[in-house]
């Protein structure tokens, strides 16, 4: 299954969905201010899905100013509340999955003890939020082995990894091929975009220098290939990335 992030207009998304059996990954539930009026946002997204004839949706959860490993009880509780709101929304609109950032900033969050605190948060969260698959996404994370520790400690069938290869490419000194080797067995979802290793540019696949051909070969050999979300900011770039995935036998529509 291939999803398109709603970084373009609804009319452009509708145009794509009319031609291909695609889903949408919405970022609207990732903004705390939007979650303050959750019922309205849920109703809005139900109507938008109907108008775009969208039957598959993934939700990107909130992340700004949040930290599931915070030592401050107020920040920890705010994180729990916002994550819970997004999860409830995902259930309400019939989402296929929900993606959450790790929220780790390496220069702020020490690695010692981080995996254990992270695993503790998610293990507790999954006690009452286990109906829908949760994918943990890397952003500024610099060490794939630290994320593997979290996934191993939680060890839940609905808690897997979302690899953002482009994030790893520009925010980590660890080669992306090593990220895939370490986290491949836990990866169920992949965010698709490209960059030149200098910033998070969200280019079309092939317009940066990520070794996407090598990455695709790895995913083709997986017993259960991942789902995908294309995160480009123009219709032209989305079509380039979509053609790349289809060329490598990752069709649109449910797999």
Image: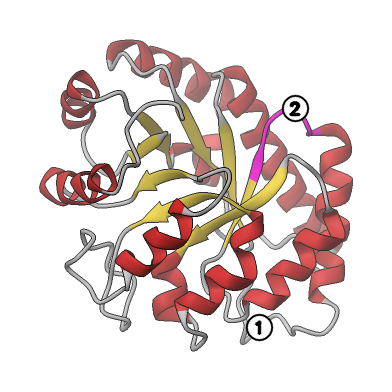
Asked if the residues shown at circle 1 and circle 2 are in contact, with their CB atoms under 8 angstroms apart, the answer is no
Q: Which residue is identified by label 1? A: 108
- State left or right for residue 138 relative to residue 197: right
- Foreground residue, 189 or 43? 189
Q: Which residue sits at x=24%, y=24%?
A: 17
Q: Which residue sits at x=47%, y=74%?
A: 168
Magenta residue check for 131? yes
Residue 86, above or below 178: above
Q: Which residue sits at x=81%, y=61%?
A: 152
Q: Which mark is residue 131?
A: 2
Q: Earlier in the sequence, mark 1 or mark 2?
A: 1
Residue at far left of view: 236
Residue 129's spot in the image, x, y percent? 78, 34
| Residue 36 visible in rendering | no
In magenta, the rendered stretch is 129-134
Tag 1 secondary structure = loop
Residue 196's spot in the image, x, y percent? 26, 79
- Foreground residue, 88 or 40? 88
Q: Which residue sits at x=78%, y=70%?
A: 149
Residue 121's spot in the image, x, y percent? 83, 55
Where is residue 137, by image quadrant?
Answer: bottom right
Decide: few, some or many residues near mark 2? Use Cα within 10 Å; few <14, some 14-19, many ≥20. few
Where is residue 14, by image quadrant?
Answer: top left
**Dividing the image into 4 quarters, which one contains the N terminus?**
top left
Tag 2 secondary structure = loop
């Amino acid at each position: 299954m291939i999803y398109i992030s709603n970084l373009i207009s609804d009319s452009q998304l509708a145009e794509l969905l009319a031609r291909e059996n695609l889903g949408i990954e919405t970022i609207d539930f990732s903004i705390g201010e939007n979650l303050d009026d959750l019922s309205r946002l849920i109703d809005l997204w139900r109507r938008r899905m109907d108008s775009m004839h969208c039957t598959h949706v993934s939700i990107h959860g909130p992340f700004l100013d949040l930290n599931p490993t915070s030592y401050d009880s107020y920040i920890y509780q705010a994180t729990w509340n916002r994550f819970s709101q997004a999860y409830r929304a995902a259930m309400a609109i019939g989402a296929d999955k929900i993606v959450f950032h790790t929220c780790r900033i390496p220069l702020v969050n020490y690695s010692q003890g981080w995996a254990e605190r992270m695993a503790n948060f998610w293990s507790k969260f999954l006690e009452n939020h286990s109906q829908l698959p949760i994918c943990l996404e890397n952003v500024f994370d610099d060490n794939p082995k630290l994320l593997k520790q979290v996934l191993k400690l939680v060890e839940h069938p609905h808690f897997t990894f979302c690899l953002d290869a482009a994030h790893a490419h520009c925010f980590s000194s660890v080669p992306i091929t090593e990220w895939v080797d370490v986290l491949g067995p836990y990866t169920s979802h992949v965010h698709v975009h490209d960059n030149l290793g200098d910033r998070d540019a969200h280019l079309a696949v092939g317009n940066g220098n990520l070794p996407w051909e090598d990455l695709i070969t790895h995913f083709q050999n997986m017993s259960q290939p991942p789902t995908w979300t294309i995160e480009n900011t123009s219709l032209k770039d989305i079509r380039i990335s979509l053609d790349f995935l289809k060329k490598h036998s990752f069709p649109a529509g449910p797999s």
